[in-house]
């Protein structure tokens, strides 16, 4: 599970990594801990380090510009917070608003998280045809928003002020 946000040297969000990877980057002096879990520490014979939540790379990494986060099934579930777009229960599958049988594609605006029951009940119909209105409309998350959603951060207001303004 990816639990640690990685920032570029310029404080721009780059990606998320596992706690183990974050600790390795810090121990190799490739990153510094910007924010840590309040009471958790990594301890070993010669190491006593706060458990990192946010790390910042020591050297700037040039990243090609991406306007949109790449689509993925996991990304749709994370974007919709694992809640069914039709009933609000726990979602385990991804449903196409315009079904594949009718030419629907795998895109952010055409897919929503769904529970298995509603996905089966809707079948190869649109929500209007099935009489199943969406509780919330799908949207395209920015790459930074996608990373924050993956970390379980409720929104930019839950971030420290120094990070919320740059993300």
Image (cartoon, grey):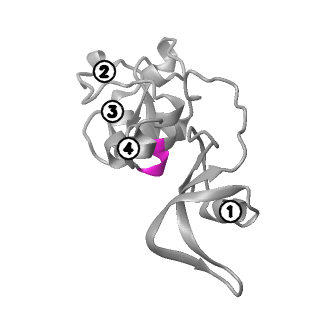
Dot 3: element: helix
Mark 2 vs mark 1, foreground winner is 1
Tell me which label, 2 or 1, sits earlier in the chain: 1
State which region is magenta: 148-152
Mark 3 vs mark 1, foreground winner is 1
- What residue would you read off at disc 4? 81
**Residues under numbered marks 1 and 4 in contact, where contact means CB atoms less than 8 Å apart:** no
Q: Is residue 121 above or below residue 129?
A: below
**Residue 68, horizontal then vertical, whole percent:** 55, 23
- What residue would you read off at disc 1? 26
Q: Is residue 111 left or right of residue 32?
A: left
Density class for disc 4 (Cα within 10 Å; few <14, some 14-19, many ≥20) is some
Tell me the distance, in whole angstroms, between the alpha carbons under discs 2 and 3. 10 Å
Tell me which label, 3 or 4, sits earlier in the chain: 4
Mark 1 vs mark 4, foreground winner is 1
Density class for disc 3 (Cα within 10 Å; few <14, some 14-19, many ≥20) is few
Q: Of all residues shown, which one is farthest toward the bottom?
A: 45
**Residue 29, horizontal then vertical, whole percent:** 73, 61
Dot 4: element: loop
Tell me which label, 3 or 1, sits earlier in the chain: 1
Tell me the distance, in whole angstroms, between the alpha carbons under discs 3 and 1. 49 Å
Q: Is residue 34 magenta?
A: no
**Residue 15, horizontal then vertical, whole percent:** 60, 43
* Towards the viewer: 46 or 94: 46
- What residue would you read off at disc 3? 121
Residue found 48% across the figure and 75% down from its top: 40
Tell me which label, 2 or 3, sits earlier in the chain: 3
- What residue would you read off at disc 2? 127
- Quadrant containing the N terminus in the rendered view: bottom right
Residue 92 visible in this rendered orientation of the protein: no
């Amino acid at each position: 599970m990816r639990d640690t946000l990685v920032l570029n040297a310029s404080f721009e969000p780059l990606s998320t990594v596992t706690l183990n990877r974050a600790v390795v980057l810090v121990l190799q002096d490739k990153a510094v801990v910007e924010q840590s879990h309040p009471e958790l520490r990594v301890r070993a014979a010669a190491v006593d380090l706060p458990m990192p939540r946010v790390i910042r790379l020591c050297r700037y990494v040039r990243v090609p510009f991406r306007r949109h986060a790449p689509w993925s099934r996991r990304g749709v579930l994370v974007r919709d917070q694992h809640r069914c777009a039709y009933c609000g229960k726990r979602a385990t599958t991804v449903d196409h608003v315009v079904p594949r049988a009718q030419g629907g594609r795998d895109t952010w605006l055409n897919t929503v998280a769904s529970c298995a029951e509603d996905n089966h009940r809707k079948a190869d119909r649109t929500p209007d045809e099935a009489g199943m209105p969406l509780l919330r409309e799908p949207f395209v998350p920015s790459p930074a928003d996608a990373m924050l959603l993956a970390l379980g951060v409720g929104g930019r207001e839950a971030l420290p002020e120094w990070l919320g303004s740059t993300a």
